[in-house]
Image (tube, rainbow, N blue to C red):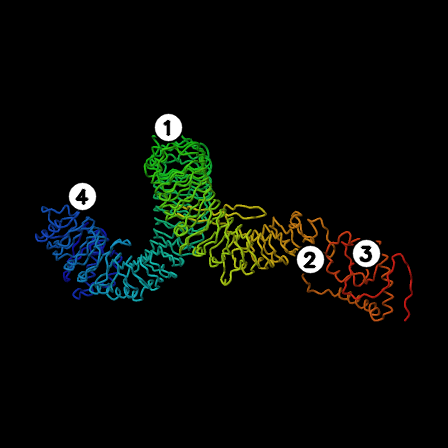
Amino acid sequence: MTMITLSLSLPSSSFLISESQNQFFHGSCKLAIPQLLRCLSYGCFWFSKYRPMKILQLQGLFLILLFTALFGINTRSVSGKCLDDQKSLLLQLKNSLVFESTISVKLVNWTQAIDCCGWKGVNCDLNGRVTVLDLNSELISGGINQSSLFRLQFLESLNLAYNSFKSEQIPPSLGNLTSLRYLNLSNAGFVGQIPMELSLLTRLVVLDLSSFHFPGTPSLQLENPNLVTFLRNLPGVIELYLDGVNISASGSEWCQAISSSVPYLQVLSLSNCYLSGPMDVSLQKLRFLSEINLGSNNLSAPVPEFFANFRNLTALILSSSNLNGEFPGKIFQVPTLQTLDLENNRFIDGSLPEFPKNSNLQKLVLSSTKFSGRLPDSMGNLMKLSRMEIAGCNFSGMIPSSMANLTQLVYVDMRSNVFTGPIPSFQMSKNLSYMDLAHNNLSGPVSPTHFQGLSNLVNIDLAYNSFSGSIPASLFTLPSLKKIQLSNNQFNSLSGSPNVSLSPLDTLDLNSNKLVGPIPPYFFDFLSLSVLSLSFNNFSGILHLESITRLQNLTKLELSYNSLSINVSESTLSSFPKLSILKLASCKMQKFPPLWTQNKMIHLDLSANQIWGGIPNWIWKVGNGTLAYLNLSCNHLVDLERQYAVPHSLSVLDLHLNQLHGEIPAPPRDAIYVDYSKNNFSSSIPAEIGNNLIYATFFSVSNNMLTGAIPQSICNASFIQVLDLSNNRFNGIIPQCLIETNTATLGVLNLRSNNLSGAITGTFPQGCALKTLDLNGNRLEGQFPGSLAKCTKLEVLNVGNNNIRDSFPCFLKNSSTLRVLVLRSNKFQGGIDCPGVINNTWPKLQIIDLALNNFSGDLPPNCFLRWKAMQVDMGTAQPDLNHLGFEFLMLNHFYYQDTVTVTMKGLGMELVKILTVFTSVDFSCNNFTGEVPDTVGALQSLYVLNFSHNALAGGIPSSLGNLSQLESLDLSCNKLSGSIPVELASLNFLSFLNLSYNQLVGMIPRSTQLQSFSETSFEGNEGLCGSPLNTRCSSSSTPPSSNKSDSVSRTVFDWKFIYTGLGFGIGAGFVVGPLVFWKKLSHWCDEHIERFVRMILPTLGFLFPCCNDVKDEAEDNVDEVSSDEDYDEMEDEAFQGRYCVFCSKLDIYRKKAIHNPKCLCHELPPISSSSTSSSSPPSE
């Protein structure tokens, strides 16, 4: 590096210019040519305090610098011969410092034979005095405090960065070097309080004390002195780097300290300094600021809009600062802005504005913020943009096609947004090396021309989108491409074979697509390949493992869940690559592949194959102590070869769904996940098994034939989150420590279908973590502990089919997360209304089963209104098809699936996966009384409703017609009366109905749905008639029409019918009037009309009783079916007594006239049907 020394008539001033970097002050001030030009116009403010210097001299100086940079004027290093005292001081310094000579490139070459001004890291002025000392990256670890360094009185630049001073404090003696303009101690290993003596360096222009600080490790501090005191004597500083220094100041403190002490500041870098906000307005006094870095603080405030007023602003870095509010859009449009970094501010939002042409923006980093909206078409104006990171935001819409014009792009990360549509072509971005568009909604084909000519592209990630069509073969020929990640798309083919040299790929991930046919042979020609992932496709054919042997760099091979048949041969054993991850699930293998020489294996998955026989001993030696994951589940394995030793290194051991028998193997000592479920193990659990589950989060031995008691040592599993011992033959009591200790971490405790007995003892702890507690199908007794109320995260509680004697669990009334409550078949008693409940109780409840208990009392109407999850109208709501379950070990996506048995359509049904939209209410086989509340009709998303075998009375509420999703309705064996509401005819999804054995009457509403059920659905209701029953209905039993339009009143008058009715009314008045007011005429009409009716009705088969023979209770018996004997008696007496034509009506079913007893009939003599007589009209 050629150095130019320019001596100026300034007090002790000699400035060095690095021609190779065009930078001011030894290459550290970063004052480039454009800044030099601006400096001319500003009059060089940082020299304004030196009155002897004239502006003309300054302009001359900078013209020399400018011409040197622009026209490449050749210069030579000007330096005097090193003075002996200076050389002696440097050699003393070397001897006192502790450094690594094998790494050193400077100190190790300092020798007596060479002039010290020619030593690496040393520069001198014309007089041979040392002015520059650069010892960065020499791995110095000590010896500085008592060294001769502090006697180099003419030193103007000192760089000790990137050394290792082993947590020493900054030497206070540095304050003796009063000529220093440049001091760099960054990442040198210094910690503790920054000494006050550094504030004596009043000529400092650049101060860098920054360091990479990690939480929990020592750091530099500014407490005494604080920031205000420390900066007070350093007014000439234009670049201040204190990153990683613990300043711990509020917004007003640090902002005012800086703005008042260093008014000419250009670069402010205070990242990770424990600063808080909000940022004070005093910062806007720093009108020369060009670079601001306040990242990794806790500012907790919006970004001030006055940042847009810094007319020299080139870089604004505010990443990880807990910013909030809307980001000022004006800052994007600052013409000088080159870098904007807001990464990892989860609470700041905003959108991208329209960008002006010729924008200087080069680096845009907005990842992990709440920025949203569409990318503007003016993105194409960012012609200097080289780095764009907007991952993890909420941007949507299509990626603008104008981005195809960004020729300077190098790095593009747009993953995890909501972009849609196709991707634009990037073939003009010749420098592009990294592209990540994963986790969006992008779709359409990927054109072969999109990446044509991108010779620098190293990484492309389009995973987790909806791209379709063919994967272009040209992608595999890009000369620099190392990683192709296209997993989780809809690609269905590969377009031919490449006809040129292949890319130097090390990663090829095509997982989870729809690729078909054989695996292309050229995949095994990527000789640098270390990752080959082809799982979850439709690749077919036979694959010989010998083809893998060419890929000697391969460390990860995934071929699971295709239609492949893997041909296993032991001949490949010696040449097989040393893999760390091998996934061959569902590959139709019938024997174990030869892996006993694999000594680097970490992850092995051979599940869902057709492997028979025993588990070989050598499987436990795979990896030579490094194997962490072993999955042999879903095969036909029957036993474990004896003398096996399960390695302690295993974190995951999955043997479920085999035919293994005998004793269960002891879990690995450091296991996290162990699954022995669905086998034929028949031993008891070893008494000390808990000592091997100390770190376990999942342990399942469900669906075996294990016996004996649950060992107390199980409580040693202090990190357990899922414990499933269900469907075995365990007996004895539930260990008390399991309730009192382990439920602090347990999310799932499943002990169902065993022979456990006794009471549930122990107290659930505060902060109980249980989400699922399943004790169904045991012989548990006593009361249920009220301390379960501490389990505020509880979602599934299933204690059905036990002998628990208790009242309704009102102690859970404040649980807002409960989704499934099963108390079925116990000895619970009393009412189900919880007194004092004001807030919503169980708003997420979707399944409640209280059947086969001794509950009594009325059904509280309000409780149905509190179950909000059952009130969602599924006709309009977006259905949530998730299942109830418990997610644990989230990084590995392990998931435990809840199950429950419900009675639906008259049958017990086990729901292995409980959809969050499935809802069921079963109160059957109790002693509930009163009426069915109308509020049940509010449960619009209900699938199953069962109130059968109770003592419910009253009518069936018509509001049940609102249950549009109902598939099963059972109200049988109650005392329900009245008619069946016509609204039930609209339940189109109803596939099971039982209303039998009630006191229902009337005709069954006519509808395709109700008439599709068998007669047994309605039997035992003597008053019911109509299809599907064989009992016919009378005319009086005709139900109301289900057509609502018939009942709508008309609002338009038709005067034609009004006139007609009026005419008939007047005519009837002339006829009826005399009959009402003239008694003789009335008797004469009655007599003749009655005789006429008596003669006509018998010929039609009808009976017509007289008034005197109709009893007062006749109205009550209108709709009852008479016996044959009663019918005969009535027929015999039909023509006896008196009757009135105007007070009777015909009953078609009974074939007789029914008299209204409230009518005042006229007294008339009985008349025989056979008699004929005439009479003249009465005289007036």
The nearer-to-camera label among 4 and 2 is 2
Give how far across and how far down residue 540 sits, in percent. Answer: 46, 35
Q: Secondary structure under badge 3?
A: loop
The residue indicated by pointer 2 is 1040
In 3D space, how far apart are the residues under numbered discs 4 and 3 (Cα atoms)? 127 Å
The residue indicated by pointer 3 is 1103
Taking 1171 as reference, is 666 left or right?
left
Q: Give me the disc on residue 102.
A: 4
Residue type marked 3:
Leu
Image quarter of the C terminus = bottom right
Residue type marked 4:
Thr
Residue type marked 2:
Pro
Give how far across and how far down residue 24 sits, in percent. Answer: 22, 56
In 3D space, how far apart are the residues under numbered discs 3 and 2 (Cα atoms)? 27 Å
Q: Is residue 556 depicted above or below 273 in this figure?
A: above
Give whichever of discs 2 and 1 has the lower sequence position: 1
Give whichever of discs 3 and 2 has the lower sequence position: 2
Q: Given contact means CB atoms under 8 Å apart, are the residues at marks 4 and 3 in contact?
A: no
Label 1: few (<14), some or many (≥20) within 10 Å?
Answer: few
Residue type marked 1:
Ser
Q: Is residue 913 depicted above or below 1117 in this figure?
A: above
